[in-house]
Every structure is written in C-alpha cells, then in structure tokens.
Amino acid sequence: MKKLFIGNLPQDATEDSVREMFSAFGTVRSISVASDIFSGRCKGFGFIEMEGHEARAAQAALDGNLVADSDRSLRVRFDDPKAARGRKRR
C-alpha cells in the first residue's frame, strides 16, 4: 500500500471528485482531502492510498496535469513520513 500526496487541488475539490480522478488507475483504498473548518472548502491538498503499482501509474499519469479552470499543475508525490521527521520547523 502506497500513500500519495496530492497538491494544487482546486478549492471546489471533494473526496468524491479526487476518488473519481484516481480510480481510473486502480482502487483507492483511503482518501483524505484537507478542508477549511469554517468554509468547508478544500485547502488545496490531500492524501490517498492505493496499491503500489496502481499508485505509480496514477502518479506518472496525473503529476503535472493542469487543474481544471486554472493555470496550476497538479502535484502527485509519494508521501515520505521519514523525510518529514528530518525537516526543521521554523
């Protein structure tokens, strides 16, 4: 099971819309889209879990694609919690 970070999501993104985007490459096992507490709108990022080969296919196909009605590119990266532990907080 691989966890993917998805960045540059539009504010109107929902768990269902992100699941639909990634389900073309396999089964989405879990999904979490960060949303603002007050407005309920997407904060622009989220995480999904898929099987390894499916996650690699989704990353290869979707990373760098333009987000609908925007000039921003979708960012799809493998989540690496070990790397986050080594970062210094400012």
Image (spheres, helix red, strand yellow):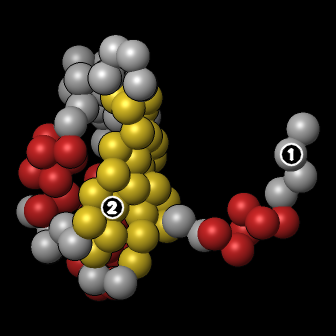
Along the viewing direction, whichever of 51 and 32 lies nearer the viewer: 32
Q: Is residue 32 visible?
A: yes
The quarter of the picture where residue 35 lies is top left
Please give the residue where the numbered disc 2 appears in the rendered image: 48
x and y percentages locating residue 73 in the rendered image: 40, 35
Asked which secondary structure carries label 1, the reply is loop
x and y percentages locating residue 8 in the rendered image: 43, 34
* Residue 27 higher or lower than 61, as above or below: below
Kind of residue sitting beneath label 1: Arg
Query: Mark 1 and mark 2: span between their CA atoms?
Result: 25 Å
Q: Which residue is depicted at the point 23% across and 18% down?
A: 69
21 sits left or right of 34 in the view: left
Q: Is residue 64 visible?
A: no
Identify the mark nearer the N-term, 1 or 2: 2
Along the viewing direction, whichever of 61 and 3 lies nearer the viewer: 3
* Residue 12 higher or lower than 58, as above or below: above
Q: Residues within 10 Å of mark 2 (few under 14, many from 20)?
A: many
| Marks 1,2: beta carbons within 8 A | no
x and y percentages locating residue 75 in the rendered image: 44, 46
Q: Which residue is depicted at the point 28% across and 82% down?
A: 51
Please give the residue where the numbered disc 1 appears in the rendered image: 89
The quarter of the picture where residue 90 lies is top right
Question: Can you tell which mark lies on residue 66?
Answer: none
* Quadrant location of the N terminus in the rendered image: bottom left
The quarter of the picture where residue 48 lies is bottom left
20 sits left or right of 78 in the view: left
* Outermost residue, front side: 38
Along the viewing direction, whichever of 2 and 71 lies nearer the viewer: 2
Kind of residue sitting beneath label 2: Ile
x and y percentages locating residue 19 in the rendered image: 16, 53
Q: Which residue is depicted at the point 12% across and 45% down?
A: 16
Q: Which residue is depicted at the point 21% across and 36% down?
A: 14
